[in-house]
Image: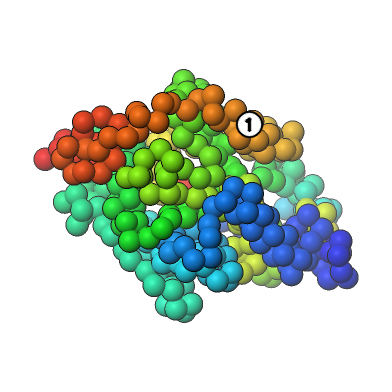
Amino acid sequence: MKVFIEKDKKNISLNYSGSVAGLLEKLDINTETVIVVRENELLDEGDSVNDDDRLKLMSVISGG
Amino acid sequence: MKCRLCQNKSVYKEYCKVHYNNYFEKKARSTILRFGLLKKKDRVAVAVSGGKDSMSLLKFLHKYGYNVTAIAVDEGIFGYRDKTLVTMVNFCKSENIPYKIISFKKTFGKTLDEIMDKKKIRPCTVCGVFRRYILNVAAKEYDVIATGHNLDDEAQAVVMNLVKSNISLIGRLGPVSGSKASPLFPKRVKPFYLLPEKEVMIYSFLNGLNTEFNECPNVGLSFRLRVRDRLNEIESKQPGTKNKIVEWLLSNKNNFMREESAYGGSCKLCGEPATKEVCNACLYASRLQ
């Protein structure tokens, strides 16, 4: 799967199939700090994702 | 995953988009009622930065028929505020909401970038003081200022003030401030007071308000950022922590309040509310000369 981490403006590729919550744990990203979007659709933490997906991790935190 | 209330796909906490919006707006409306934040006839100045919190607040209050005007402060932070203000202006035009933009440059003679170039002043300190000053002055035409502060902001403020031993400042926190302390302080309210930052972000996303991630370049210098990250770590391991911090504040706030007379003065230079002879805004402004 391909994951774009918005805050870091970084693209990463990895093999993963499972829940959104599990993906965030694997990436060591706190669930409090991002929302996960697939094709402009918001995913719940219990939703399944797999290797074919292209995901965007949008930052919850903002500053200023 | 399915919505807990219908067969549509869930987006958060097992709510679909429609039921999530209902859940969020109901929580904000109950906060307004619980703390008596707004009346329908109030002229509401919404402090707007163009970020997700204030834009969501503007959208929410406008949707529920409040008489809102967006008030934005342009600190003059190149590459940051100029972008968020475009978002705000475009939204206000599309929704037919009146707006005003007031700049540091026009009010104090310098942008924040120019202040940072010349002076060794903590940006968040001077920025906070100047922003509050501008909003206080601008708000005189309105009954109340509404800000997009959320549960995370408040929990962070409690912890920051405890860590720094600014105990009296804890008494100034809360969902409503200003009007009881002094007639010079405009009433300030926080309708998203009990909504976590993540829930505001989701509301913003679902309603097409979110823009490209944009963080103030000065935030890295902020103590708040470190507190924010630690609180998020704790919250993920112990859900409900932020809420408990804020409920603790609500139960104990009165113990930390100063005598009201301490807030009753006005600045001898500008006439705005002050706890000393000269307000902090005039003090900082004089140092910029």
Relative horizontal placement of residue A32, taking residue B257 as reference (left or right): right
Q: Is residue A36 visible?
A: yes
Give the x, y percent position of residue B9: 82, 67
B188 and A21: which is toward the camera: B188
Q: Quadrant of the C terminus of chain B?
A: top left
> Which residue is rendered at x = 66% and y = 61% of the image?
B25
Element type where label 1 sits in the image: helix
Question: As drawn, which residue projects farthest toward the left?
Answer: B289
Q: Which chain hosts label 1?
A: B
Query: Picture quarter containing residue A12?
Result: bottom right
Q: Give the x, y percent position of residue A9.
A: 53, 55
Q: Quadrant of the N terminus of chain B?
A: bottom right
The residue lying toward the viewer, choosing from A2 and B80, is: B80
Quarter of the view holding residue B180: top left
Residue B233 at what x, y percent from top left? 65, 34
Q: What residue appears at the point 67 percent right and 38 percent down from the top-left corner?
A: B243
- Placement of B160 over or under B27, stated as above or below: above
For the point 49% across and 50% down, the residue is B189
Instruction: Identify which residue, B264 or B58, lies in the foreground.
Output: B264
Instruction: Categorize mark 1 by other alpha carbons within 10 Å: few (<14), some (14-19), many (20+).
Output: few
Q: Residue at x 41, y 67 (%)?
A: B69
Q: Is A47 rendered above or below residue B234?
A: below
Q: How is the image coloured?
A: rainbow
Vertical relation: B264 (above or below) B142: above
Q: Amino acid at mark 1?
A: Ser
Residue behind mark 1: B251
Q: Is residue B243 left or right of residue B138?
A: right
**Vertical side of B224 occupied by B70: above or below:** below
